[in-house]
Amino acid sequence: MTIRQRFQQVFVGVLMLAFGAVMIAYDEESYPFIIALYSLALELQGFRLIWYFFTMARLMVGGKSILYRGILFIDFGVFTGSLVFVPQIYILIYLSGTLALSAMIDLLRSREARAIHSPWKLKTFQGAVELITAVICLVFLHSTAMVVDIFSAVFIFSGVMRIVSAFRRMPVITVS
Amino acid sequence: MRTAACLPDNSYTEIRLRRYRDALTISGAAVIAFSVWDVLKVYIGLFLGEKTLSDYFTDLLPKIRIPEGVPEETMQIVLWVVLLAGVIGVSIFILLYHLYIGLNAMQEGHRTVKKKKIVYLVCDVLSILSSATVLFQSIRVYFVGGEDARQIGLATLLVESASFLNYVYLFYVVLKIRITERSAS
Amino acid sequence: MQGDFHYYATYCAAVLAGYTHDESLSVCHAAQLVDHCSRSFLKKVGGPDAAATTQLQLELMDARTDRLGLCDITRIWASFHFLPRDLYAPVKKGSKNYKDKYRLICGPNGDLLVETVTLAKDRGLAAAGIAMHVLADTWAHTYFAGTPSLVINNTGYHFYELMPQEGGGFARRRVAFSHNPSAKEDPEKGVYVGSVYQSTENSIMNLGHGRAGHLPDYSYIRYAYLPAWGGYREIIKDNPSDYEHAFAQMVYALHWLRDGKEAFAADTYAEDVIEPHLDTIRGIIDRRQTDASDDWRTFGERLTGDKIPDFDMDAHVAEYRNAGSMSKPDTFLGTFFDAAHRQKSMVTTRIMASGSRLAGIPPRKMTKSTVHAVEIND
């Protein structure tokens, strides 16, 4: 990992820790915060696609679709940001669904990894944790404060993992 | 050693035609994507937004004169049905209309139809006119200000401009394809 | 290319180049092992991580696509499966990243091919096998780059198989790729499997010829398509012609590795050697089948009169495992790992020397904690 990438990892990790802390501190009031975060992510993705179009994709056959995609993402982000009045339950269902999907993918991949004698335990653990979190969220859907706490914990956990991985030694093949 | 059995046609005209056809396919897909997103936005706005369909219903109800002998509850149900039918009907029409333009453009781009169609181009011209009107109105509101100004963000303007330019570009590309094809033949 | 060409056809080429049955088996075993020597295999065998010549689908799915992850992928795929044709190709438009990726496009008879074959000289049969794998793939994988890139490796709607007609000429049949990896390919119905479109530039789905499915690996096929980088210029990939060139060039290269005195020459083919067998070779190449192993095997066995065993990736594992640390380098797998090291190091160095950082970042740019890793001495 280069110094810049390490710095990025730590920065994102610290941000996630901060988000987790804010969510625990403000409980249900932090919903606009979650929406703002989601909206910002979509807008950034839109700008990233537009940048990608002008630097690379404009030269590609069929690359114009990237530009349209970027514009739609920005609009999607701005529109999501305006939905601060959305009932919380919809956001929770959406977030739990995303988590469950990611868990299923991890579990399927760990099964494949096991079949070919590759490392599979960490992936299974990750998938199981995600799946359990998603199920707990759905069970406590009506106790929004509890669900916010669960998501805060997930955020803090991910933040710590990122920071740890930023300082982990990694084998790199160099040419001297 | 044997050489390649056939060679590609990479004449200037053929390359230009490929470029235009690809642009037409993407423009057609964009017409559909923009309209689906517009309709979705309307629905999300009406059910989850700041002013929901229920609010419109509450605003409308006192303004309607209830005929004698008709219970208020019946009238409420009728109004709900009319409102929902109106929203669903208009959105289906908008979707089908744009689907018609988009799919025809994609078919012409992919060359899966031999007959040159005119009607979807007429629809495209109508869309150019309507989106130009909406865009002009949005720009006016955005710059002149007013109460609605806050609701029209720069991103919405961006999408409206992109949608308008897409309709124009689609028309331009179809013209270019047909002219190039005619001159080539 | 797949086992039919890398294993059985390489065996035939080695025999025609003058190698004995056993030598030819070693050459073709090494050539085929390049498609199996993944990190999982190396872990099982106890070989050096840096000798990986391929990545399994699962390894790829887990591969990082940050700068260093991409370097690792590029080193493996550009060195062994998509050897760049011209690292200094003129590109007028685009960002530096675009130009760097464009210059990784694979093709036959480039300077790197000459270096690849030259590097294998006097280094044993495993090194020759690796070089033959790389050489053959330059013909099959032409026009695709061994790095994940949407703007280079993507394919689109304009993709046609050219079907030979009885009266001569070709008819076009559009290829609509299925994205279900477990689906069975059916050349008669034009059912082929390809990776799914991913709009992310560095997605693994955009590595090599994934977007064109296995079509580059079938010797019989001719197809026309618009490469993402080609500015709407159509390319017709004539595999029967390319595979014939690949075979004839392998015979020449193997002959040169054995007895060559002068420098290895690109664009040179052992036409005279294969001439007596041309009808058989063309018959195998042109036959509409997704696996020509049986045909190549029959041809090979007819050439030597010996039986060619099925490829077994574990064939030399016990020898390597049981050898002491001093004698490991002299085992078959030891020489294979060493040759793989050298090849990867050579290609990486050349890519870095061209100013591109896609295959590696000079060590001085790295943090102290990352440099402890395995090092390859060129």
Image: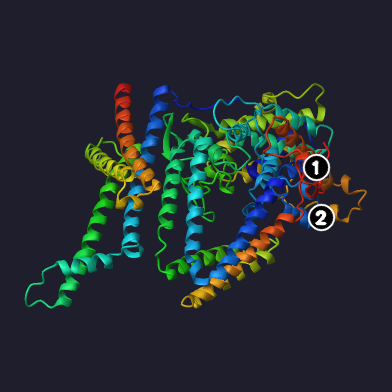
Q: Compare residues C128 and B49 and report the one nearer the observer.
A: B49
Q: Is residue A60 left or right of residue A18?
A: left
Residue that numbered label 2 is attached to: C46
Q: Is residue B179 above or below residue B55?
A: above
Identify the subunit bearing mark 2: C
Secondary-structure class at tag 2: loop
Q: CA distance from mark 1 to mark 2?
A: 26 Å
Figure quadrant of the C terminus of chain B: top left
Figure quadrant of the N terminus of chain B: top right
Q: Name the spot of residue A138 as percent of width and height, x first.
A: 49, 74
Residue that numbered label 1 is attached to: C22
Q: Name the spot of residue C261 as percent of width and height, x first.
A: 82, 23
Q: Compare residues C179 and C247 and report the one nearer the observer.
A: C179
**Residue A108 seen in the current view:** no
Q: Name the spot of residue C121 as percent of width and height, x first.
A: 81, 32
Give the residue type that dot 2 points to: Gly
Residue at figure coordinates x 73%, y 39% from the top left: C361
